[in-house]
Amino acid sequence: MSGWGTSSRTVTLGRVQPQSPALRTIYCNHREANFAHRYKGNSISTTKYNVFTFLPKGLYEQVILLEFYRTETGIWLCDSLGISYDNFLLFRRVANLYFLMVSILSATPYSPVHPITNMVPLSLVLLFSLIKEAFEDWVSITLHAYCSIPFLPLACALIDFLILSLFLVWEQRFQNDMTINNTLVDVLQAQGWESLQWKKLQVGDIIRVKQDGFFPADLLLLASTNVDGVCYIETANLDGETNLKIRKALERTWDYVTPEKACEFKGLQCYSAECINSSTKIVVKVCEVQCEQPNNSLYTFTGNLVVDNQTMPLSPNQILLRGCSLKNTDYIVGTVIFTGHETKVMMNSMNVPSKRSTLERKLDKLILALFSTLFSMCLLGAIGSGIFIDRKYYYLGLSQSVEDQFNPSKRFLVIILTMLTLLTLYSTIIPISLYVSIETIKFIQSSQFINKDLNMYHAESNTPASARTSNLNEELGQVEYIFSDKTGTLTRNLMEFFKCSIGGEMYGTGMTEIEMGVAERKGIKVQEAKTSTNSLREKGFNFDDVRLMQGAWRHEPNHDACKEYFRCLAICHTVLPEGEETPEKIRYQAASPDEAALVLAAKNFGFFFYRRTPTMIYVRESHVEKMGKTQDVSYEILNVLEFNSTRKRQSVVCRYPDGRLVLYCKGADTVIYERLGAGNDDLNKVTRVHLEQFGSAGLRTLCLAYRDLAPDLYESWNEKFITAKSSLRDREKRLDEVAELIEKELILIGATAIEDKLQEGVPNCIQTLSRAGIKIWVLTGDKIETAINIAYACNLLNNEMKQFIISSETDAIREVEERGDQTEIARFMKEEVKKQLKQFLDEAPQYFCSPSGPKLALVIDGKCLMYALEPSLRIMLLTLSLNCSSVVCCRVSPLQKAQVTSLVKKGARKITLSIGDGANDVSMIQAAHIGIGISGLEGMQAVMASDFAIAQFRFLEDLLLVHGRWSYIRLCKVVMYFFYKNLAFTLTQFWFTFGTGFSGQRFYDDWFQSLYNVIFTALPVVIVGLFDQDISSSLSKKYPELYKEGVRNMFFNRRIVAIWACFAVYQSLVFFYFVSLSSSTSRDSDGKMFGLWDVSTMAFTCVVVTVNLRLLMMCNSITRWHYISVGGSIIVWFVFIFVYSGIMTRFDRNDNMFWVIYVLMSTSYFYVTLLLVPVAALLGDFLYLGVQRWFFPYDYQIVQESHKDDADSINTPDSQETKEHLTPDEARSNAISQLPKEVSKHSGFAFDSPGYESFFATQFGKYVPPKAWDVARRASMKSKSKPK
């Protein structure tokens, strides 16, 4: 990325980079003292190059790095220089390096072609690649690629032009940087605020930021205009979360609001002229910050503020990060601690990991095969030349002194030099425009088709689909495994308080979607529950029970427990209230939807949280004794023990107005139960039963507990807490250890149950993807009961499946855990997991014996998965998992999600896709071949790390079955067509070599050879890659089984390559021998025989016409763009040859081309040959395609035949197939993205496609082998019965 000091390889969101052991000491408001530390300035640059680094970095990346980028030394140098070693862009591809080498060879005396004819196409291809990269990345431009060819004199002018034109694109990012760097901010100068540019800020400066302003650097909050030093910030630029967060200054610095007061905050004890007024001399205080070194962790900070030798601990609550904005606060005063590229947001600037598709990797193998073919052709020709060269051919003048390449006395040297000559002559066998064509197609597919598909547009959130990279379009058509998060991905992440358990009593009368699904599976008829007249409904609260609502809880036998329960909900949280302090108009800003739902529940139960300060929480409580009466109660918040993924709980120590000290704690049931005190066994058991029932209903559960604290106990503990909070090393660990001291001997209050409903269309989508042969794994942190029921609800599991469950919740494991010996627990659990894996592996084969056997499903929890992922058990887990149709992993950590994904990706070598919506899904998303981010309610971390972003899980259906499948088929056709046309063209030159004594004589003119790929055959193949469509989008979703063709890679394998190669060889023989033999008996209008350039021009004309017509034969649908591109390419060839052969200048290398086309076209031979050669060349293709379609059809061809009569209607918005797959909103709007209307070229076939029964029978679990002889019978019967 920017600058030389950051590495886009090592920076990973949320992972703290290794830091220097030394701490950073900052002297506040004292530039001279900080100058000695040489802290970085606040100017930032997001351009990759500047004037000084352009040449060295470009040369290094493209020349040196290419040789050893995979070595440790290369990686280390990449990191040191801030160069992305994953992204070589242009010359990282071996084909481009090959063309560079050919361009160099063409400049030698041994080349039969002029050097400019190789350099110009290469330059055009690289120019196009640069423009595409610049446009897609907007400024990830790759000007440095041209630094690799400065020694090509004829390309210098073109390079200058490229640099100048692309500088205009680079300048836009540069202008953005300049705008940001020159933004003004108030800085404390001489007892007053002065406006200063952001780039001039330095570490230690004291600044003022006003409301709605952005923080120019990472700041330590000193004071705020709000009460008690509180300010509110929005972090959307960091994590996408729009809810406001609270930051609080240390009490010692609250009064530094005015410049006069802030002037006292000085880094060194001194007499300062800046702080002396006209009549007094002020001794400023010694103020310095001791903190950690710059790092990329957004959510942690360790440091101390030292004021007059008094040390006060700092936490993330006092830090304002660059990129955040100030809200609901007039202004704040802060001191700068990290600047420029050392700020946390800049250190989190990272590239999405560079991923290459499977097809592209296979394409590399095809290119290597072409290299082998090229080497064999050159070697054969070189050996033939060494044998042929002999002085007996006196007419060749070899008896005299000749150049080394034709000297019979130096045959070995002749072979070597002829190899170099033939290498340049046959260079067209490698398609120079292949990569740029593929990149163009992919880019347009992603930017125009995927991003603008209204079927993947979510109207409710105004979120379209977004392809964040175009490298993986075709990979979407070959996915075999999907790894999905649950919350926010399969579910809506819109939490509603649904049920609860208080004091051993369960409350809540509603039924969840999961419960209804369970009842339906059991055949129980469910009646719609009637809501009581007292029920309240609002977003986040969907609870109904007359025993608790409208203050009725006061009459419950456990009303004291109810009161404690509601107070815990109202106090133990980090929610911020907004708006008017009335229940109807207040809004809650919460870090998670769960917290907001719990606070809303407290409000609806009569405990209305309406205000908070850094030290107080205000709750308007319903009077316990008197119905309808309320009282405002203020609770002093003494300590907050925050939630994290390790603790899985949150605690608050508060003081009641009467002095009572209480610790309220809420968290996961497993964590809370471990910390419960003795007694209350009956309550604990009953609540555990309720928790299991909630989990079975698919509800998210938390346990609530409390503990009364003695004052002396609290004071003793608080000292340890303050000490741990002041620690600069291992602060988080020490705080957790101190929290353990007080979070014990808890008294259980009850449990909450929150419903997170499934997203719309998830069950149907999963069912459709399963029919497509895609296996879906759910990786979730929920309990095993919740996960299983969610899996049932979304059709991932069903009663017909054989379920293998590996759980740590067994009696045997619980018995071992009760002993408390961790070593014994680990040993026993590993043995249990191994035993179960072995048992299931032995049991699984019996279900594969019969075709009607049940499908398999595996359910495993996080504890067991930890042991199953160990090297000794990993293979067993993988083998069992691959035999299962569905896998559900419960209670898994983010790391385990990534490990499971990598296990299948690397162990099974299957194409994987991960989809999630939260920061905990980032590692899983980046570990898979394809990462999908859901634009949900948990921020944008998953989207920022993804390859594609969608708003709803159901959009996977369109993304994979439509766009993925189309992209795969189109790009396979593009690659094979390039392979075919270049092989056919080059082999004509190869056959000519046999008639020239292997001398390296050219058959075609230099410009014919150079422009063949980049002009005469370039556009039609791009049109095919964009608009070819075998079936409509609606049929693609109606017959998801068609997707299996991509999974099996049926359109790009060795058999397909061999077939195209055979036709290329056949056509090249027709091109060369048909034209050369027929021309030997033909004469021009003057009665002269045709010469070499006449024959080669005739042959080249036939090649251009034939390969363009062959492209039309491979199309499934033909639009006007196909006709325009194919016809235009042929016309461009004729225009070129008319001009080229009609003009001769003194710079021409060959005057033999003069007037050639005019001589040819004056004879009937030209027109007869132009008619017969393409027909003869394409006859074999036509017969093969007919036989293949009739007797050995692909599945999509069967669907084409079955729907050929409604070909005109399958793409209309009103078609039945389309309506079945649209949401009501989409159906009403009829906003369906369609490609240009095509006419099927197969609609005139008067026979059914073979395999008709067999294909559709497979959709119902039947197998019917196709019978070729039935095809002819059906065809004849149909033609006879056809109405006249």
Image (cartoon, rainbow, N blue to C red):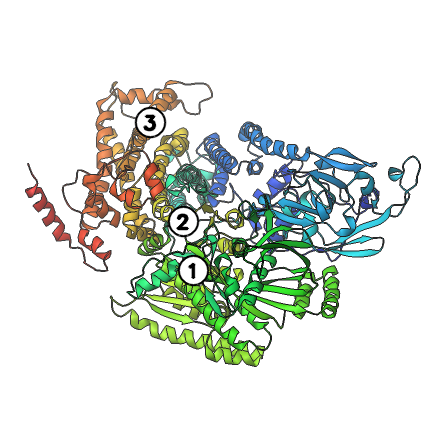
Residue of label 2: 475
Q: Which mark is residue 1167?
A: none
Mark 1 element type: strand
Q: Position of residue 856 (x, y in %)?
A: 34, 67
From the viewer's perspective, is the residue at label 1 or at label 2 nearer? 1
- Cα distance, mark 1 to mark 2? 21 Å
The vertical placement of 788 against 449, above or below, is: below
Seen at 72% across and 60% down, the residue is: 725
Amino acid found under the numbered disc labelled 1:
Val
From the viewer's perspective, is the residue at label 2 or at label 3 nearer? 2
Q: Position of residue 721 (x, y in %)?
A: 72, 64
Q: Position of residue 234 (x, y in %)?
A: 61, 44
Q: Are marks 1 and 2 in contact (CB under 8 Å)?
A: no
Residue of label 3: 1128
Q: Quadrant of the C terminus?
A: top left
Q: Nearer the viewer, residue 1196 or 1207?
A: 1207
Mark 3 element type: helix
Q: First in sequence, mark 2 or 3: give its number.
A: 2
Q: Are marks 3 and 1 in contact (CB under 8 Å)?
A: no
Residue of label 1: 778
Q: Is 713 displayed left or right of 926 in the figure?
A: right
Amino acid found under the numbered disc labelled 2:
Glu
Q: Neighbour class for label 3 at 10 Å: few (<14), some, many (≥20)?
A: some
The vertical placement of 1253 against 94, above or below, is: below
Q: Is residue 302 visible?
A: yes
Image quarter for residue 881?
Answer: bottom left
Q: First in sequence, mark 1 or 2: give its number.
A: 2
